[in-house]
Each structure stands twice: as C-alpha cells, then as structure tokens.
Amino acid sequence: MSLDDLVVRCNIKMGESVHNEAPDGTPIDPKLMRIQRTTNPRPKVPQKELVFGKVFSDHMLEIDWDYKNVRKEGGWHPPVISAYHPLSLSPAASVLHYALECFEGMKAYKDVCGRLRLFRPELNMQRLNSSLARLYMPSVDPDAFIECIKELVRQDRDWVPEGIGYSIYLRPTAISTYPFLGVGATKEIKLFCIMSPVGPYYPEGFNPIKLYADTLNVRAWPGGVGNTKVGGNYGPTIRPQMEATRLGCAQVLWLGEDHTVTEVGAMNVFFFWVNEQGEKELITAPLCRGDVLPGVTRRSILELAGKWREFKVTERAVGMKEVVKAKNEGRLLEAFGAGTAVVVCPIRAILYEEEDVVVIKEGDDVGPLTKRMWDALTDIQYGKFDHPWSVLID
Ligand SMILES: *Cc1c(COP(=O)(O)O)cnc(C)c1O
C-alpha cells in the first residue's frame, strides 16, 4: 500500500483554498532591514517561572505595507527590528472595528549544541498567506518573511531558553492600521512579530484533560473561516470555554454538522481506535469542509503515522455517536489534541450530552501512541537528528 493509500487526503491543501487577488506591490526585502537594538535590555525571567504568552523578548519585527500607488511606491516597506514597544494607531483603524487581523503561531528551539531551529516554517507562511488572502490583504514572500523572522530570533538568541520542552513562541501578526470606518479593503497594514519564551507544557509529565463537547455553540462551519487563523475566530470562543471550565472541563470539543468532531480548543483532535472493520486506525477531521484549522502539528502527525505503516491513517468526519459506540464496545484506545504550543495533549474524558465518555480510566497511564508521537515530534524539533522539517537558523 502506498503512502497515498494510507493517508486519505482531501482535495483542498493548506494555502490553496483561496486565491489571493489583493495587490501586493513591492515584496518584502530582508536586505533592506534596519536593526535598532534596544538600549534598555530587560532582565530575563528565570526558566522555572515562564508562563505561556506573558513575557516578551527585548525586540520585535515590524514590516508596514501600504496601497498608495502600488505600482510605483506601494507595497512592503523595509523591515525594522527594534525594541519591543507599544503600537500607536488611529482609533479608526479597521482592525479595531472589523477584526481585520490574522496571526500565526510557531516556535524556535535551541538544540543540544546551542543552535537555533524552526519547525516547518514554510507551512506557517503558507497558512499566513491563506489567512491574509481571506481578509483581502496582500501576501508575503515566504522565504523573505522567514529570513526576517530568523534575524529577529538571532537578535534575541539569549531569550531562547535551553532544554527539552523549552522554546520561544513566535507570534507573527498582521493588522489593518487603515483609519476607515467603511467595511472595505484595507490600504494600510502592519505585519509584526513578537516572541515569548515558554517552558514545558507538562513540567511534571502529561496531564490528560477532560473536554466539554459543546452542542450549543459552533466554532466554524462549511464555507466559514475556521480554516484560517483570523482573529475573529477566537474572541467568541472564550465564553463557551468559561462554560466548559464551570463544568469541570479544561477545553471545549467543537462539534460540526451532525455532532461531528472538528477541533478541541485551539488544537486539532485525533482518535486512535479499532474501527468497525476491526482495524487499528488513527483518525482526524478532514480539511475539505473548511471548518478545521490546517495545523502544522496535525499534518506532521498524519505524515509520521503514514510513514510508520503500522495502522490505518484517515482524515474523515467522525460523529460523537461513533465515538460513544467505540468507547462502549471497548474499541476507543486513545484520544489527543495537537498543536504547536502543546505538541500533543492526551484526552482523559469527554462530557457529551451529560454523560462522561472516559478514554483514560482513573489511575491509568497515557496511551503509548500519544507518548510516541510526542517523542517523535520533539526529537525532530530539538534536532536530535537531522531531519528536513527542522530548519537551522544560523
Ligand atoms: C493554531 C491552531 C491549531 C494548531 O495549529 P498548529 O499549526 O499545529 O499549531 C489548531 N486549531 C486551531 C483552531 C488553531 O488556531
């Protein structure tokens, strides 16, 4: 059986779903970059005290774009790296009114030799371009923007914590700074990147979570924008998340049509089970309906599992009814969320229609596939061996 047979694919690939018609103008040119180092470096936070997304490194990257006269002088301005600073923008800026905003999430890692590495950054660039296109914003040249990001990481090399589980989280973001209250195409954009040093998600080993399968609120739908990282997708998830917390659950399990499983919180979700045909199968929601974010971690897991050829690997919509049935018949082996921040996050139970679907019984250990996936991904990310997915910065 070929890899293609093992990995059932949908016909829409990441970054290909939307054609970008917005005018780009002058492309990003890393050679024109200006670097103004801070004169006021801040003290580093001790590694043990790092909390996700609260501490930021000394520098940030900014690249402005404007439309004026695209053919002549519009387009991307020279990239600037300078001290981390507040932004100044008009209260009419359309990001503040119509959420003309999108972002990425990626990490830089320090390997055992102290070298800096990125993980599949070209996939983040592809996805950024599909988010930008959805907002009728210009695209970025992937190689040029990766070059700028690499320089930012180099400038703040001392801010990248060492050790397995430690990394610096990168947040490339594009906002419309155009001061215009009409709902229309933006003519001014700021693309920036900030960085936040982060510690291990599981300092004391895996902490399997319980999910609340929300049957009331919907995160994304066919024809919507759930397949892009636009800011507007995230604000409205906070209230359902609070409801999940009230019910003793750590994350929301987002359901689609007919209570099919789509994602968990801001992670993709996988089930490992024995299917109705008696075959072991790793299964995740497909991208073709457009209600699932094309995660870099998701894709990497599908590709790794496909290469192992030890069980079936499938992208297909799975209904909660099927999950409950598999559980009742003792066929549900493991379940986990997947994303850059956590790598993989084991699922202990799902609260669905007032019943607990238990995946890991009290006192039982996290499943072997979940652990193996974590090891396989982190080995590549931290450069334990050479692998084309790990990109050296120097
Ligand atoms: C970012 C994100 C993911 C995970 O994507 P990765 O590229 O693996 O980090 C999954 N779901 C949602 C909704 C997201 O925003």
Image: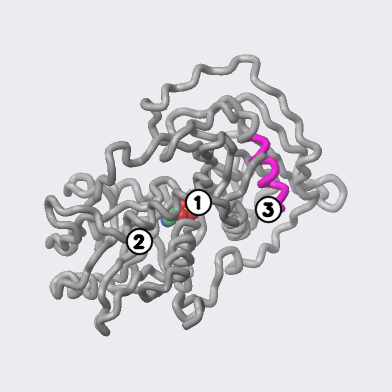
Identify the residue position indicated by label 2 in the image: 269
Q: Which residue is mark 1?
A: 380
Query: How many C-alpha atoms fall within 10 Å of the one at disc 1: few (<14), some, or many (≥20)?
Result: some
Which residue type carries mark 3?
A: Pro
**Disc on the earlier residue, 1 or 2:** 2
Q: Residues within 10 Å of mark 2 (few under 14, many from 20)?
A: many
Q: Residue at x 53, y 39 (%)?
A: 111
Q: Which picture quadrant has residue 218?
A: bottom left
Q: Are marks 3 and 2 in contact (CB under 8 Å)?
A: no
- The amino acid type of the residue labelled 2 equals Val
| Label 2 CB sits under 8 Å from any ligand 1 atom | no
Looking at the image, residue 213 lies above or below residue 149: below
With 369 as the anchor, is 164 left or right in this view?
Answer: right
Q: Is residue 119 above or below residue 41?
A: below
Looking at the picture, tell me which residue is in the foreground, 117 or 99: 117
Magenta highlight on residue 142 = yes
Secondary structure at badge 1 equals helix
Up-down relation of residue 202 to residue 288 (above or below) = above
Q: In what quadrant does ligand 1 lie?
A: bottom left
Q: Position of residue 306 (x, y in %)?
A: 45, 71
Kindly report the distance in space between the C-alpha atoms of the residues bearing marks 3 and 2: 27 Å
Residue on which disc 3 sits? 142
Mark nearer the N terminus (1 vs 3):
3
Q: Position of residue 200 (x, y in %)?
A: 38, 38
Where does the magenta region start and end?
A: 140-152
- Which element type, helix, strand or loop, lies under badge 2? strand
Per the model, the C-alpha gap separating discs 1 and 3 is 22 Å
Which secondary structure class fits the magenta region best?
helix
Q: Residue at x 72, y 28 (%)?
A: 35
In the shown orientation, is residue 89 left or right of residue 277?
A: right
Question: Between residues 244 and 91, which one lies in front from this camera angle?
Answer: 244
Left or right of residue 111: residue 184: right
